[in-house]
Amino acid sequence: MKMITKRGIFLWILSALFVAGLVFLTVSLVSNGDEWVMKRFNHHVYSDGELIGAGTIYDTDGDVLAQTVDGERKYSDSKTTRKSTLHTVGDPKNFISTGVQSVYDAKLTGYNLLFGVYNIERYGKGNDMKLTIDRDICDVAYKALDGRKGTVGVVNYKTGDILCMVSSPSYDVYDVPSDIDTNPDYEGVYINRLLTAHYVPGSTFKIVTAICAIENMPDVFDREWKCDGEYQPEEGVAIKCNATHGKINFKEALAKSCNSVFAQIAIELGPSKLNETAKELGIGTPVSISGSINSFGGNFALKKNAGDDIVGWTGIGQGETRIAPVTMLRIVSAIANDGKATSFNIVDNLANQAGKALNITLPNNQVELLSSDTASKMKDMLRYNVENQYGDYNYEGLNLCAKSGTAQIDEVDAHNIAWFTGFMNDSEHPYAFVVVIENGNSGSQTAGPVANKILQAVVDKD
C-alpha cells in the first residue's frame, strides 16, 4: 500500500512538472516566437544571411522601396533612392539596426502565433508596409548633402509623420564597396545619423537656453547686455564671441548668436534651472519613432557646483553636451506646434497580400514641452533670426523660423559641425527640419542652403 502511495505521489510530481514545462514553453512561444522565427538559419525568411521573406515596402506615394521577387529581395529601381532611403528601409543583412526591415522584420514576414510564416509559403512573401517618407524629397536631401557626412530630417509637426530621413555616408545595396569597413569615407555608414549620432549642438542649443531664460527671467526682453567680443566670468577661462556686438538685447543676441550674452544668461540661470529645462525638453530621453525605433537619448548634465566658465560654455552649446539631431527636431516641432510635441511616426500602414489592413500599434499623442506663451515668443524670435540675420531672400516664400549652429570640435574651423534647424510657420506646409553637416564650417552658410533646397522641393510637391 505504501509502495502504491509513493508511486502515486511520484506520478503527480511528474504530471505537475509536465504541465509546468508546457506552460513555460507556451509562454516562451508567445513572448519569443517572433524572435525564434527571425533567426538567420530559417530558410523561409533568409537566404545566405539576407532577408528574402519580407513583403513590399512603399513610400508615401506608393513607390516601391523594397520587395521580394521570386524569393529574392529587390530594392528601388533608382540608385539615388536606394542610397537616400537606405537608413530608413535598412539593408539585406540588417546591419542597420534602425531600418524598418530590421525593426519590423516579424511583421513584414507576416509571422503570427497561430500560422507562423504561412504567408511566405502561400504568397512567396509576407506583409506589405507603407511608410510616411517621400522618396523624391529624400533624393533631393541626399543630393544636397553632396557626399558630405551628415543628416537631414523633415517632419510634419502637426501629425508627427516623418517626410524625410536621410543619413550620409550611404551606399548602394546592389554595389556594396569592398572597403566599406576600412575606408574612412564610410565611417559610421551603418548609423542613422538623424537618430543615433552624438553631436555637439553648438549655437542651436541657445534655443534651450533662451526657453529657460523666458521661463525664469521675467524681465529678459527688457534688458540689455554688453558684448566686447568675449565674456570673462569671475572664475575660469574667457568665453569668446563671434564678433563684438556692443549693447545688445535678448532678441538680437539670439539672432546674432552672441556667445557673450548667452554665456551671461546661462551663468545667471545656473545649473539647476538649465538642467530642469533640458530635461523638460527631452534632452537625455530617447525620441521614439513609431513606438519601436529609439534614438540616442542625449547627454546633458551640469553639476550644481560647476564653475561659471563651464556653465557659460554649456549655455552656448559647447562643453560636454551631446544630442541626436532628432532631439532638436522634436524641440523645434514643439515650438511650431504651440509647445506640444506630437509623437513621431514613420509607418503609415500594414497590409497582407490579400490587401487586408492589419492592426499595428502606432503612438498618436502630444506632450507639452513648453507653454504656449513661451512657444509663441520663441517662434517670434526664430522668425526674427531669418528676417534680420539669415535673410528671407535666401529662403524665398518659406516663412522660415530658424536657428543656425556652428559647433566647434577643435581649433580648425573646417572641422566644425554645421547645424540649421527650424520650421515653416505655414499652416499649409507645417514642416519642421534639421540639417547637420560634419566638417561643415558655418551652420547658416553650409547647412542653410541645404535646408532651402529641401523645403523648396517640399513646397513644390505639395
Image (spheres, rainbow, N blue to C red):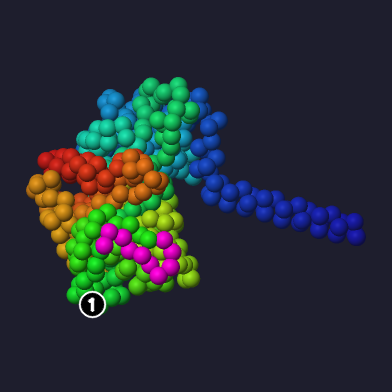
Residue in the image at 19% along x and 42% along y: 449
Residue in the image at 36% along x and 65% along y: 232
Amino acid type shown at disc 1: Asp
Q: Is residue 37 above or below residue 252?
A: above
Q: Nearer the viewer, residue 232 or 71?
A: 232
Magenta-colored segment: predominant secondary structure: loop
Residue 87 is situated, as x and y percent measured from the top left of the image, at 37, 38
* Outermost bottom residue: 218
Residue in the image at 35% along x and 53% along y: 201
The residue beneath circle 1 is 219
Magenta range: 228-237
Report the number of discs. 1
Asked if one can make out residue 49 in the rendered structure from this viewpoint, the answer is: yes
In magenta stretch: residue 230: yes
Residue in the image at 58% along x and 52% along y: 27
Q: Nearer the viewer, residue 406 or 275?
A: 406
The crowd level at tag 1 (other Cα within 10 Å; few <14, some 14-19, many 20+) is few
Residue 376 is situated, as x and y percent measured from the top left of the image, at 19, 67
Asked if one can make out residue 332 in the rendered structure from this viewpoint, the answer is: no
Residue 387 is situated, as x and y percent measured from the top left of the image, at 12, 55
Residue 416 is situated, as x and y percent measured from the top left of the image, at 34, 44
Q: Nearer the viewer, residue 42 or 176?
A: 176
* Outermost front residue: 228
